[in-house]
Amino acid sequence: MTVSAVDTGSAYERIAADYPRWHVTHAGDPGQWVASHDDVTDLVVAATVERLLDRLEIAELKRLTKRWRREWVVWRSQGGSWMATARVDDVEPTLMCDSPVELEERMRNPGTWAQRAPGPRRPL
């Protein structure tokens, strides 16, 4: 991610950590924050970095949904986790991650259902 030299704190740090494949710039004063991604045709624009973070979350969810629509259903949980449910057989059925980068990596390389550790044995 490429950014200007302005330090705006927590929202800015979250953008850098959670959206490393997005190119972010700040255009002048008062200016706009602008984010772009190679796989997304529309720019994401906001007046503040906090609003840009909100809009990036929406744009990234749309990007992941479009990119993985055949293999996964992607959504955000009420707690803020990034979630995916498999549309194909023989893979881990549900993924839950803290960031979209982590989720996309797990969707690329999901474990198989058979790789999951067995539960405790119950008596017959």
Image (cartoon, rainbow, N blue to C red):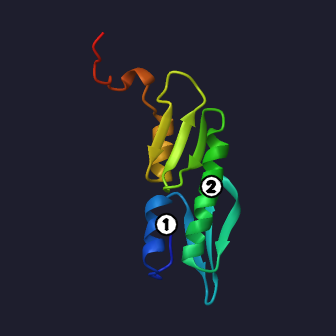
Q: Residue furthest front?
A: 124
Count of marks, rendered view? 2
Per the image, label 2 sits on a secondary structure element best described as loop
Picture coordinates of residue 59, whole percent (x, y): 64, 58
The residue that appears at 43% across and 74% down in the rendered structure is 10
Q: Is residue 42 left or right of residue 75?
A: right
Question: Would you say the residues marked 1 and 2 are in contact, meaning their CB atoms lie under 8 Å apart?
Answer: no
Picture coordinates of residue 38, whole percent (x, y): 62, 55
The kind of residue on which mark 2 rests is Asp
Q: Is residue 49 above or below residue 81?
A: below
Write down the residue under mark 1: 15
Rounded to the nearest angstrom, the CA distance separating label 1 from label 2 is: 16 Å
Q: Quadrant of residue 114?
A: top left
Q: Is residue 61 above or below residue 124?
A: below
Neighbours of disc 2 within 10 Å: few (<14), some (14-19), many (20+): few
Q: Is residue 112 above or below residue 4?
A: above
Write down the residue under mark 2: 38
Per the image, label 1 sits on a secondary structure element best described as helix
Neighbours of disc 1 within 10 Å: few (<14), some (14-19), many (20+): many
Q: Residue furthest right?
A: 42
Image quarter where the C terminus lies is top left
Picture coordinates of residue 106, whole percent (x, y): 46, 39
The kind of residue on which mark 1 rests is Ile
The residue nearer to you, when weighing 39 against 108, is 108
Q: Is residue 57 left or right of residue 42?
A: left
